Amino acid sequence: MAAFVFEAAEGGAATIQRLPPAEETLPIFLVEGELLPGDQYVFQEVISDVPVGIVLLSSPGGSLDAGIEIGKLIRLRGLGTVVIDGTECLSACALAWLGGQPRAMQPNAMIGFHAAYVERNGAKHETGVGNARVGAYLTKLGLNEAAIDFVTRPGPYQMAELTPDRARYLGIMVRVLEPAAAPESPEPRALEDAAVAFVVEHMEAGSRQNAAQARYSAETRYADVVDYYGQKALPREKVVASIAAYIGRYPVRSLQVRGTPTAKCERGVCAVSGVADFAAEATARNVRVSGSVEFTLVLVDAGAGAFRIVSETSEAVRSTTEPIDRRAAETVRRVQEELDRLGCQPGPVDGVWGARSRAALERFNSATGTQLSPHRLSPSTVMTLKAERDGACVKSAFRRHRESMR
């Protein structure tokens, strides 16, 4: 089966057909490639004269209508569904796979779900109407609320992978088949070269992606749990959240890997180490950080040139933090000095306008009844602060405490 699927994939065209019959086996149907609108009718025609059989799926997804309708036909005819090792069945394909009776997978197959979406101006937008259709379909298949939430919760740029363990936890009945016979291991040098290429692309692409793209990329590249910068066994969902938070703090980023990293692979596990130069800017906070890091990523070979990241660490070799606009930084520093004088606790007087400084200005506003903007500082902000007596925030806090004791 696997050989046939891979040969078909090389042709680049979607395939829906019955495989050549083998002695004493159930009929096997292949659905491979992107699902397009109307493919459900092709599938209906292919299975029309066979009462039983197995549907072998290998597809990145595609048309929601085609996926749901093929799933309905599979369930109506009582066909089984299978995704084998080394192949993927995502999005609309995974919805079709759920229609199987029984549904089966090999341990290293990739089955993934995300919410329904429509494309507008090149961007993906989640659609409530589409999710409602998916929910109704899954309910008819007998899935429980937790399973339906798992299938429909990830956004359009995310992917929730259904592993055998997760299927058991969610109550989704899945037969786990014996793994495919292990292919001959590639030459160590070839595997090491592939690991290096994966890491370089992974790290440098991260500096070009927005939060949604980075979330989707991380969902597909990290293992279920990761040793992530000193945090042991961190769930992939938290790794993804950490990456998105960093992008939120530093919208402008660049990273360049120096030279060629070193790699050492043993029994399908590769450790890749190197040095990278980075820079990141947060315009709203008027701060730029730059420097170099030594990094190490540990990967597990997932076959077909793909890897899963199981460990990621780095250590700064050189790091510099400086203002983007030095004149603006001087204004920030003077505001921080005044807030410190007034007892408003702005944190370090360093010319960097962060969360503690913003909170300090909010405390000053509350204490004095002013409405200075924490998002737009100017010399007039400094003058207003200078006009107040020492300890304004402290006196206000003491006054509120005394009034609460009455």
Image (cartoon, rainbow, N blue to C red):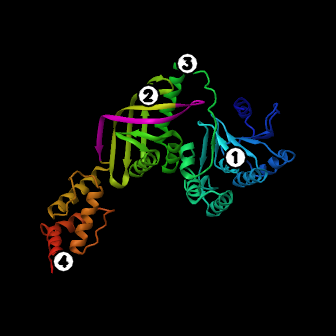
- Label 1's element? loop
CA distance separating discs 4 and 1: 66 Å
In this view, the residue in front, 215 or 223, is: 223
Of labels 4 and 1, earlier in sequence is 1
Of labels 3 and 1, earlier in sequence is 1
Nearer to us: label 2 or label 4: 4
Of labels 2 and 3, earlier in sequence is 3
Of labels 3 and 4, earlier in sequence is 3
Which residue has dot 3 on it?
187
Nearer to us: label 2 or label 3: 3
Coordinates of residue 220 in the picture (x, y in percent): 54, 42
Residue occupying image coordinates x 78% and y 49% = 39
Which residue has dot 1 on it?
102
- Label 4's element? helix
Nearer to us: label 1 or label 2: 1
Q: Is residue 58 visible?
A: no
Residue extending farthest bottom:
406
CA distance separating discs 2 and 3: 17 Å
